Amino acid sequence: MATPKTRASSFSRNIPSTAASQVPGVKSGPNGTLFLSSGISDLDKILGGGFPLGSLVVVMEDPEAPHHMLLLRNFMSQGLVHNQPLLYASPAKDPRGFLGTLPSPVSSKDDKSLDRDSEQEKGLRIAWQYKKYFGENQQNSNSQRDNKFEYCNEFDLRKPVQRQFLSGQRIECISTQDSPDLAALHDRCASFLKQFLKTDGNISGAGRIAIQSFCAPQCTYFEQEWRVLSFIRSLRSMIRSSNAVVILSFPPSLLSLSFSKRLQHMADTLLSVRAIPDEDKDLAKLLTGYQDMIGLLSVHKVARINTQVPVILEAATFSMKLQKRKFLVLECLNQAPVDGSSGTSYATSGSCSGSSKGRSLDF
């Protein structure tokens, strides 16, 4: 008698929030959804908490700039900080060399505020018999802060990740060039995801898979559309039944329009990145802070796990900026003023025609 096949679904049993809070890097959300951080706090807020466990995240690359690498680097570094197993696939011959380019985590905002407080305390003149109490309190706060895991860290893109995060044996790398028919990559993903199979009411850990430049021209399966689609369909079925997240980037400009649309349709969360020309005068007049932008990120689809209610975003396109030239931040696009003399813009104008300019609308 043939065994019945399990059917993958977007609905899963609710896991208690207490069980999820004990796992580093996992956060519970509405409707029993569990999230992994993308490594970018602004992106987590935009998506409603991060990447849901059991979801497939697809990033459409820009042929003119490798901005998709910023998303992959932060996603992978965040997993290393939480000691989560990582599987990385790349069309490069030596994908392990990419690990040396991952950004390094920095101190949290609480650490920065405490550092400011400590500097202020040094300037205070306190009697010598009370100084020991301040030292004890500072040690207790530091120990409590060290025992607490952060959900999302800030990463310095100028500094490589420390070797202590790369020394563990929880990192697997594979070159997609070694998988001409995607069979080897499929087997590696299947064996990796078996570590994180979903069980009723229990979660012991979470995993991350990052696949860079899928369907790159140097791969032999580049023109085998049916083989690629079957791989994505199988990967999505496996990820549904596991406590892991897969982020996959592909170059849509190198694929046919119909093939690209099919890949986008299979994604749970669909993102795209686009570079900004250095000397685009028309765009510079339209947007404020144009000189600080390095690119644009668009959210085309947000994963819906354990719910049928669509997610409505306040904005779909965000500017990518480097704060202090090292932190990646996302901001809503703001339109520049109509002219340099007036401070009103199209977004803040409260009138529907030019004749009502300067008057407030009375409803």
Image: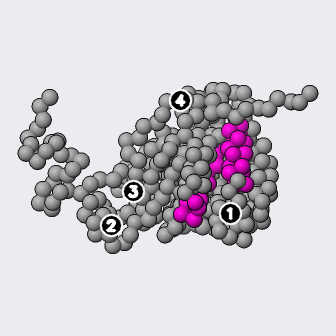
Disc 4 is placed on an element classified as loop
Quarter assignment of residue 97: bottom right
Residue 13 covered by magenta stretch: no
Look at mark 2 in the image and give the residue it sits on: 291
**Nearer to us in this view, 107 or 19:** 19
Disc 2 to disc 3, C-alpha distance: 11 Å
Look at mark 4 in the image and give the residue it sits on: 308
Look at mark 1 in the image and give the residue it sits on: 223
Q: Which of marks 2 and 4 is nearer the N terminus?
A: 2
The kind of residue tagged 2 is Gln
- Badge 3: few (under 14), some or many (20 or more) residues near its Cα, within 10 Å? many
Q: Which of marks 3 and 1 is in front?
A: 1
| Residue 319 disc label | 3
Residue 323's spot in the image, x, y percent? 40, 61
Query: Magenta span covers which residues?
Result: 227-256
| Residue occupying the point 55% across, 57% down | 257
Decide: is 77 above or below 315: below
Image quadrant containing the N terminus? top right
| Residue occupying the point 70% across, 67% down | 219
Task: Please report contact status of discs 2 and 3: CB closer than 8 Å, yes or no.
Answer: no
**Nearer to us in this view, 250 or 149:** 250
Q: Which of marks 3 and 1 is nearer the N terminus?
A: 1
Q: Is residue 132 visible?
A: no
Disc 3 to disc 4, C-alpha distance: 29 Å
Q: Which of marks 2 and 1 is nearer the N terminus?
A: 1
